[in-house]
Image: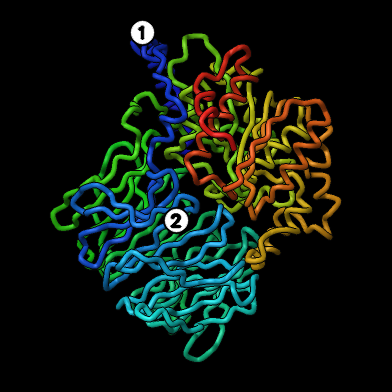
Amino acid sequence: MRRIKTAARLTVLALMLQTLPGAMAAAAKPPKQYTIEQFMATTSISGASFSRDEKQILFTSNESGIPNVYTQPVGGGKPVALTKSTTDSTYAVGYFRNDDRILFTRDKGGNEQNHLYVRELDGSEKDLTPGDKLKAIFGGWSVDGKVFYALTNERDPKFFDLYRYDAKSYERTLLYKNENGMTPSELSRDERWIALSKPNTTSDSDIYLYDLQKKELKHITPHQGTASYNAATFDPASKRLFFTSNEGGEFNTLRTYDLATGAIAVHEKADWDVFGSGYSLDGRFRTTVVDHDGSQVVRVVEGPEEKPVALPKLPGGEMRGVTFSPSGKLMAFYLNGDRSPSNLFVYDLKTKKTAQLTQSLNKEIDPNDLVEAEVVRFKSFDGMEIPSIYFKPKGLAPGAKAPAVIFVHGGPGGQTRRGYNALMQYLANHGYAVLGINNRGSSGYGKTFNTADDGKHGREPLWDCIEAKTYLASLGHVDPDRIGIMGGSYGGYMTLAAMAFRPEAFKVGIDIFGVSNWVRTLESIPPYWESQRKALYQEIGDPVKDKEFLVATSPLFHAKEIRRPLMVIQGKNDPRVIKPESDEIVEAVKKNNVPVEYVVFDDEGHGFSKKKNQIVANAKMLEFLDKHLKPGLAASAGKAGAAQAKP
């Protein structure tokens, strides 16, 4: 209630400010428009790992046009590429604890079959998880750095086993053989306890504890009704397991399980979901992350008494990805804002000095030309409140009405959050209002909201998108006759569903690797999703038992109803939404004599990691939208990018 009243007051204040002549003049001034090449000249970086002497920091960057591993002096300086792949995306894991070797992962063409590699001191690379058709996941380091852990599904494609690797010889030992579909998620520092996750549905899960010493398995989260339980971390003394759960409430709280007594206690809570928690290597600091109404809030406490640590307050964004150096003297973090992509900072906890190491936004782009997003809410058809992230284009003249796009996130249980989004900013910069809708079923807004879409896909969540169109039209600056819908993965499905089941609603649709046939998608999910198979069936439908319902809610079988222009974008190597999903919907819609544009990238999977492909995809999307939502206007920014490369 307080949030609603505050929002109302802010709305009144905004309306008052808009009546001021200066504000009106500022609003009418159009921002400088930037090409997709300028937007893509921005660098995307992630991850952080300190070297053993704490003088270097390791991270992933796409500065070369494709993700590779870089290192940079903690005191500042030019990043140096340690991997130089030109074909396959490469992601940093971290420095070895006792020397300057590094671990990294790499797949092939977006197929998500990541392997774990080591870069030796002489620069040579070694695959630590060789073989075909396997996926490897890094599992963490021992405190002394003598061993590290990894999970692979090489023994059985459906299940991940846990291995211990010797950091010198790379010899490995099987720690846990997964034969029941419960995936190892956390390992205690004394290497005695493994926390195993067991999803029951997408909103209900359990934690089991396996005692490596006694070879005993124990279910520690028996419960009635729907509740999620997710392991977060073991404490440094290996006496407690920290986990999140929403049992007994709407939001996740951080709780502890005493390994000796079995006692469970609530340890930390917020008015929103607690994402998780983790300790620094030296055990001195514990970090908690909270999903606060689409924004991320970081909390850090110190010592056994958990004294709150004062964190640096920087303008223009929110703190993300906190990592501590081995000694605990330094803290690396990212600052990400609506108008600023993630930049890497290092904070000295003793001197309280903060150093910015990177400048990710292209220097040719003035952040003042970009849009500061706002959290908005509207009532859907049944009164349910739908939270969304809104990008209002700058420079609208008084009385002018902008075209708009409703952007649906992936998932189905994903969430559109505050923060830098290159595509949304690119569209807003070219005059489009963009609403990132968090339709029912999205995470971050409580258990009831998250489960409100179970078994209802293609219906109630879609109707939220229809109501979003009504909301946009009510703003006064959006043209109700020029509203499109777009999204990736599940958002692509929602786009196709809107075009097929409510064909009159949207002027245009852009489907980015979206599901068109639920029956096939559920039958062809990757084998390593076995532990989640039943959960997906519960959420969406069983391809055998619920086939009639899945056919009824699959756009492919209703493609004859699609009569508005459609664009489909697909990665050839996508293991989640396979290429036939897009091939068939394109073929079916073309039979309606409806304008269809189809873009396929031969070297991408479920998401596009290469800048050259991002340039083509985004440019073609803007050109397509301009063609159909801005009649008679050529896509000036799009054509330049599209001409550079042909997928």
Q: Residue at x 54, y 60 (%)?
A: 246
Q: Position of residue 119 (x, y in %)?
A: 37, 66
Q: Which mark is residue 21?
A: 1
Q: Is residue 450 visible?
A: yes
Residue 260 versus residue 411 in the image, above or below: below
Color theme of the render: rainbow
Q: Is residue 474 visible?
A: no
Left or right of 238, for residue 393: right
Left or right of 250, for residue 527: right
Dividing the picture into quarters, in which one does residue 341 lie? Answer: top left
Q: Position of residue 538 (x, y in %)?
A: 72, 59
Between 65 and 316, the one nearer to me in the picture: 65
Q: Residue at x 46, y 69 (%)?
A: 127
Between 110 and 240, the one nearer to me in the picture: 110
| Callout 1 secondary element | helix
Q: Position of residue 65 (x, y in %)?
A: 43, 43
Residue 274 versus residue 223 in the image, above or below: above
Q: Nearer the viewer, mark 1 or mark 2?
A: 2
Q: Which mark is residue 90?
A: 2
Q: Position of residue 398 (x, y in %)?
A: 47, 9
Residue extending farthest right? 548
| Callout 2 secondary element | strand
Amino acid at the residue labelled 2: Thr
